[in-house]
Amino acid sequence: MADFELKKYDEVPIGGVVTGGATPELNETGDWRSNKPIFDEDKCIQCLLCWSHCPDASFYIEDEEVQGIDYDHCKGCGICAEVCPVDAITMVPEGEDSEDE
Amino acid sequence: MSNGNRQVLTGHQVVANAMRQVDPDVVAAYPITPQSEIVEYFSKFVADGKVDSEVITVESEHSAMSACVGSSAAGARTMTATASQGLALMMEIVYIAASMRAPIVMTVANRALSGPINIHCDHSDSMAARDSGVIQIYGEDAQEAYDFTLMAQRLAENEDVLLPVMVTLDGFTLTHTAQVAELLPDDTVTDFVGDYEPLYPLLDVDNPTTQGPFDMPDYYFEHKLQQVEAMKNVPEKFLEIQEEFSSLSDREYSGLFESYKLDDADYAIVLLGSTAGTAKVVVDELRDEGKKVGLLKPWMFRPFPGEEIKDALKGKEAVAVLDRSLSFGSSGPLYLEISSALSHEDEKPRLYNYTYGLGGRDIAEKHIAEVFEDLENPELEGKMRYINART
């Protein structure tokens, strides 16, 4: 969590509105994921279905190609693994993937 | 000043015409007796090209208010209408509309809440919404429902308010009966309601916002305090809007409640909605007999004008508060407000609490006359009594 200065009721926008569209930059929201998508670059055919289906915005894209997954915001929903036509994404229980070993 | 058009219309038609003249961007609603015809008439205006509104037909009132919240967040002027079970189903999102400061104007055609299932009038539906954060205005007749629907638009969208406004009219008694009502000219209403400039329209992609996000304990309280402050601004703004509206119509609005022969009255009745019409007849008859009786009819129930009502009831001998809903295990909601408003007074009138009209039970002139008789009897003070019920 970012370090916020707590403001009074009349110092913040009404209705809980967050202005500036910077919420994801300020908050890491992927810390309660129970399943983690693992991306296999070798299998990927760059169809971008994972990127277009992701309910967050958790795929790093450069030059119209998937570069990897933003684990700071991925909630582990698994939609990307479901839609991937070449099984380039697999879901593993959090803490049990090879990167964590 | 008015070049208005006096017509014989039902409450439904009058409210639908107010909506036509407001010409909102979006109306999302689901049919329920006794509200349905409001949206039916409005849908005809849409089909006939009289308005530019988008009507969203949904599968429930929960969805209706959800669509309204989304549309309002997008920056669209948004209206809806419901009643009874519809409002109950909508309730979760009514609270959210208020907290998101969505200036949605909604009509409630008052109807009893189930169970037992009943389609007739009482105020249990809107009273269940009294803590939701919406502004509540109760109309006595179709004319008031029309006038307040137009004023509600201005009140909801006032930059110091920005809250949903609920305008109520008694189901069947007002919705289904033909009454004489004056509709203002269309262009007068267009000028009166003006253009809506949303504060944080979601569709303004150059200024992106997040709306309706999660609040932790560190901000939830402050956001509720914002709603508290917005409510505090309502009475002053409502009076300003009334003054402007009065200059455009034949009606004179200048208060948060109507006082009828109240100033010199010793005995007064306080009640909401259409029964005020019956009470006025009784007040006139008793006045002819030389009795000093009067009526206080709150227009605004949220925010509750306790301070102003306290002043208006100062010096009265006895006051009867007539509630058209129950709060089981407690007193009526209106009684509690009046009782609370008077609680710090050293000398206060004797207070009497009545429940009447549940599920459409009739209340006649003789019943109101009996209440005024009761008020002369100090022994009946404070006891809940049920008018025209077989106790």
Image (tube, coloured by chain):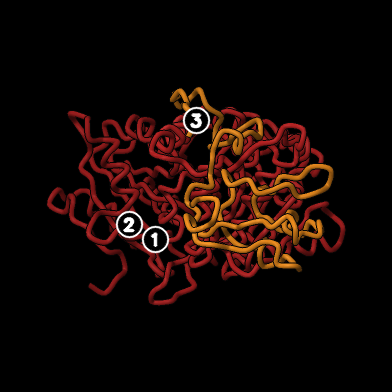
Chain colours: A orange, B red
Q: Position of residue B21 (x, y in %)?
A: 76, 47
Chain designation of label 3: A
Outermost residue toward the left in this view: B379
Residue B261 in which image quadrant: top left
Gap in angstroms between the C-alphas marked 2 and 3: 66 Å
Chain designation of label 2: B
Amino acid type of disc 1?
Answer: Glu
Q: Is residue B83 visible?
A: yes
- Mark 2: secondary structure: helix
Residue to which mark 1 is pinned = B365
Mark 1 touching mark 2, by CB under 8 A? yes
> Does B84 sit above or below residue A26?
below
Residue ID at (71%, 51%): B19
Q: Are marks 1 and 3 on the same chain?
A: no
Residue to which mark 2 is pinned = B369
Residue B115 in which image quadrant: bottom left
Amino acid type of disc 2?
Answer: Ala
